[in-house]
Amino acid sequence: MKEKFCFITSVFVLCGLFFFSALTGVSSAQIELDEFSLNTVPVFVNDFGYSHDFTPSIGVEWRVDGIEVESTLRSSGGNFRIEVRVIRAGGPDKLVAAWNQYVSNANPVTHTHTTDENELNNWPKFDRILEKGDKIRLTYRVDNPAGGTGFVDESKLRIYSDSDYVDEDTGLRVWAVIDTEEKGRVDAAWRFGGRADNIGGMGHNAVWGHFYASPVDVEWGSPNNPDVFVKIWYDASGRIDVNFFHVSVPDIEVYSSYVTPDDDASLHEEGVTNLYWRYVRHCYEDGQSYEEANYEDGNPAEGYVPDLTGTFGVNIINKPTTPATPETFIGIWGMINIDQKGPRPAAFRLRGRSETPDGHYVIWGYFHADPIDVFWGDLNNPDLFFKIWFDKSGRIDVNFFHVSVPEIEVFSTAPKPNFSPILPYVDAGTTIMSDRYIRFTYP
């Protein structure tokens, strides 16, 4: 079992945040994933530095949105170099953050350094996710021209994930709470996906991402196991639509708040998504707000018959072999029905994979309109989310979530044990604004 460190000050702070959340229904801005502590750090002189590797929980994926290093330092006059690196199991290593701190005090003084957005943006290749086998390396070096000695009496490293989305320009805030069987109501963690500005030159903006259960709270929690997809549409008219799409099992409470530009109104909406009410929208317009929800049964919309006779491409997705199950291949596709152009193939984006500790497997991503076909087509303007759940029992659920305006036809092949560039579709349906969710299940 991994050793945990508990500090009285932290306990009081966290308890205060929980009490405030319970009173107001507002979650804290960040979830503390872990805290590592070194109470005895060796003395070092000049450039002879000291490094220590911290190992996150084995088998758990963490998305890191904040790193804090608290150092108790003393020196007769030296410049401390403090570095945080990610040591990848498969390499290469990555410098995430570095700070310089001059110390000229013989008595221990505590200095706190935190990452900013620019430092974290140095980590885009890995999408800020720590995976199994990764480590965090904390290094101290001191440059003292006088030849003095630097001391690190104590060191603490904390890592955090965001628990909400906040738009600094508009003040819009979005968050969620998951009603888990294991721990009751817990704050969902937020993973930012992307943003498209001035789409097609028409003044519309879009933001997408998802909420997921924190691995601190439940073993199936992972940044690559979405529980609620989110797409926010900033219309050029000033209207804001916050769209939530439930893609999990437990009930999930969804919240948003918005202060109008003239500060005349502070608006707030909340709702619950679950296995039946999978779609919830919060709308802010003309100083007012409202909520709407769709009942979704997972069946294709009635009266719509996708054309299976055409020649379409196919996106082959594979689930790697595990000790319990063989490798599996499945094909999915999406066609967007565009006025005057008819069905057009949607661009496919595979965004993540994850395996839960008890053997389930997840693949997720989205489709979007090709900018060649329509002005609103954009890499960061999803039109159709998907999540494929490979249950350890052998069942496979292929889930599609419509997050656009036009009709979108969806297709799926049957799972196959071997790769083939051409697989026949066996299931098809059409997602529409009033019937946004389709699920195909195998066997």
Image: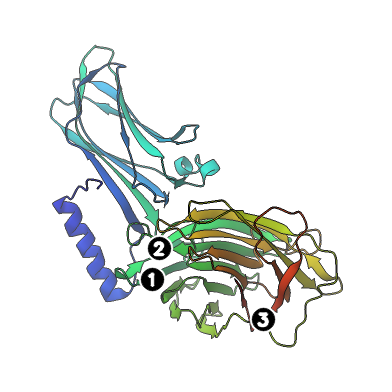
Quarter of the image for residue 381 reads: bottom right
Q: State the residue at coordinates (55%, 85%).
A: 295
Query: Residue 429's x, y, as percent?
Result: 71, 77
Q: Are marks 1 and 3 in contact (CB under 8 Å)?
A: no
For the point 42% across and 45% down, which residue is it? 132
- Work out how far the residue at label 3 is from the one at label 2, CA to CA, in angstroms: 28 Å
Of the two numbered discs 3 and 2 on the same chain, state the one appearing first in sequence: 2
> Residue 306: where, in percent of width, then height?
78, 77
For disc 2, the marked residue is 213
Task: Report the amino acid beneath label 2.
Answer: Ala
Report the front residue among 78 and 398.
398
Q: In this rendering, would 358 be left or right of 435?
A: left
Between residue 121 and residue 217, name the one nearer to us. Answer: 217
> What residue is shown with label 3?
300
| Residue at x-position 71% and y-position 69% | 411
Residue 127 to residue 325: above or below: above
Residue 208 or residue 249, whichever sits in front: 249
Question: How far across and how far down the image is residue 423, in percent?
Answer: 75, 61
Which image quarter holds the C terminus?
bottom right
Mark 3 or mark 2, whichever is nearer to me: 3
In the rendered structure, which amino acid carries the disc numbered 1?
Ile
- Alpha carbon separation for disc pair 1 and 3: 27 Å
> Is the residue marked by circle 1 packed among few (<14), some (14-19), or many (20+) residues within 10 Å?
many
User: How far separated are the C-alphas under marks 2 and 1?
Assistant: 7 Å
326 lies above or below 183: above
Reading the image, the residue beneath label 1 is: 178
